[in-house]
Image (spheres, rainbow, N blue to C red):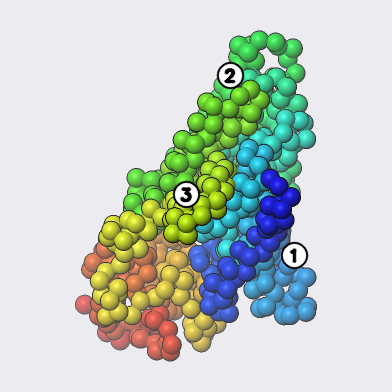
Amino acid sequence: MSEAAGRDTPSPVAVWGFVSLVLILCAIPRIGPLRMYDPDDIMRLLEVRALLAGQSWWDVGQHGFAGPGLTMHWSRLVDLPLAAVVLALRGIVGDAAAERIAAIAVPLVTLGVVMALVAAITRRLAGRPAALAAMVMVPLTTPLLSQLQPLRIDHHGWQIASGLLAAAALILRRDARSGIVAGLGGALLVTISFEGFAFLLALIAAAGLAWVFVPARAAQTRGFGVTMALATLLLHLVTRGPGWASPACDAIDPAWLATIGIAGIGLALATLAPLRSLVGRFALLAVTGAATVATMALLASECARGPFGMLDPLTYRVWFLNIAEGLPVWHQYWPTIAGSFTLTAVAVVVTLRRVLAAPGDRREPWTILLGLLIAATLCGLIVLRSAALANALAIPPVAAIVADRLARARAIVPPLRRLAALLGVAAIAAPGLVLTGILLLLGVPDRAVVSIPRPYLTGEKPVCPRQPDVAPLAALPAGATILAPLDIGPAIVASSRLRPIASGYHRNAPAMRFVIASFMARPDLSRSAILGRGVDYVVGCPGISENLAYANAAPHGLSARLERGERFDWLQPVPIRDSPILVWRVVRPLASPPA
């Protein structure tokens, strides 16, 4: 690239700053009322508030809910940057403003980290112009943008960054230092969320196979294995404290520590063996893999069905099977599939061609990228939200094509031809976005349209937004027990002193089942359960996906009949101004016997 061209190219910091500014402007309507995108974001804010209020570092439970509160499996690591910003600023701007600044700044920092890592991989493979194209592609990739924008403070953004850090370290260099960085990234990935364990296994396989085929990577593989094992153990002890030995299928526990330790130390020991043959190295790697699988089968066999396999059938069917981001690809609608996997499909083909065409040492990083890209894509096919990491890994090979086509398009003289070429480059840079738009224009429905009945779409009935403003509920008596949809429980706790019974967190399955069953049962049966639980108010949120799931599964249940406008003598309507939320006070004693 010429010196003049280099001066004309924007700096990476400028690209990140411009993207951040655009995202902040788009989020302004949500920032004032602090209307976050997902219940998990609100729950993360509650975690941070509890920590700053003096709750133990090792206690991640949520005690603002009814009864003993909610048991949580989350990691405190993600709370740290948010808490640091709030703690630094609340004495200057107040708690409310400090929380908003943290909810804006931390996701944008995470976005910057992801953009920098994607650019580093791309620059290693295809040069600086392609690296800048890769940075621009990050916010154009829907699965990434959905996790890396202002107010998106849940742990998924840090999952992407941690997995990407480990992958980048394996791709960029061969030395022991890069192995240490990769091991630390893998340890952070599974500590932040054990959902990353499948990709960690892919990282282990990639590091091991890289050493098998390139013995010069022995130091890297050894550093990765030792660091991964020790860092996972240390992070577990630091974040779990006295509860470090508690068994779990949804987080690191002694069984998973043993599995990861066997894999990591086994890799390190294998690289110390004085073997010169590829077959010998592969045999040692196979022994390590077999030992890892045997440890997992012996110590964690009860987790074979996953953390959601223990849910009762009702909760699993009505709640879990309606969480699209946690389901496999065969439960998704075509626009979602297009937006999640078009870029990865293109990238696999492009990367495979590069592997076959690249000479000698230049083939090595492309091969590692191809293996990790395929593994991450498979993870996304099983759990949709995991596709975000796959899309991050898919950007570098496609960015190389974008940079090349962009240079060609700029050289075209006729303006219309140049414009057409530039539009083609834009389509290559965001193929998932383009294909999703085409499908929607053709009338192919997505989940949001399919799940909402026509009266709510046409405005004939009032409908709650996905995360409604529940602040008006603060007018109800403090400490009252609330039967409310699971999805709005965190928002109620965040904006009032009311105590919902449960929210959508699987360790609290009995409380979740009570909420679901109470809304779905016949009103006379619901009344008995509600009175027995000491519920003071019933809250409805018409049109949200959870309420629709209740109505579809139980058209004669309490929730469905309340939304149809039916009234019962044991539920007295409570007027709530300026909100589509509906509230009923549970009448005690009953005005009349049950029908």
Looking at the picture, tell me which residue is in the foreground, 33 or 487: 33
Label 2: state its secondary structure: helix
Residue 14 % position (x, y): 68, 61
Residue 286 % position (x, y): 58, 19
Classed neighbour count for the residue bearing mark 2: other residues with Cα under 10 Å, few (<14), some (14–19), many (≥20): some
Residue with the mark numbered 3: 428
Label 1: state its secondary structure: helix
Amino acid beneath label 2: Ala
Name the N-terminal-most of marks 2 and 1: 1
Amino acid beneath label 3: Ile
Name the N-terminal-most of marks 3 and 2: 2
Horizontally, residue 231 falls left or right of residue 343, namely: right
Q: Residue 58 carries which label?
A: none
Q: In which quarter of the image is the N terminus?
A: top right
Residue with the mark numbered 1: 84
Q: Compared to 585, does 165 lie above or below?
A: above
Residue at screen point 35% across, 86% down: 573
Residue at screen point 64% across, 19% down: 212
Quarter occupied by residue 174: top right
Amino acid beneath label 1: Ala
Looking at the picture, tell me which residue is in the foreground, 206 or 580: 206
Looking at the picture, tell me which residue is in the foreground, 580 or 505: 580
Classed neighbour count for the residue bearing mark 1: other residues with Cα under 10 Å, few (<14), some (14–19), many (≥20): few
Residue with the mark numbered 2: 286
Residue at screen point 38% across, 53% down: 435
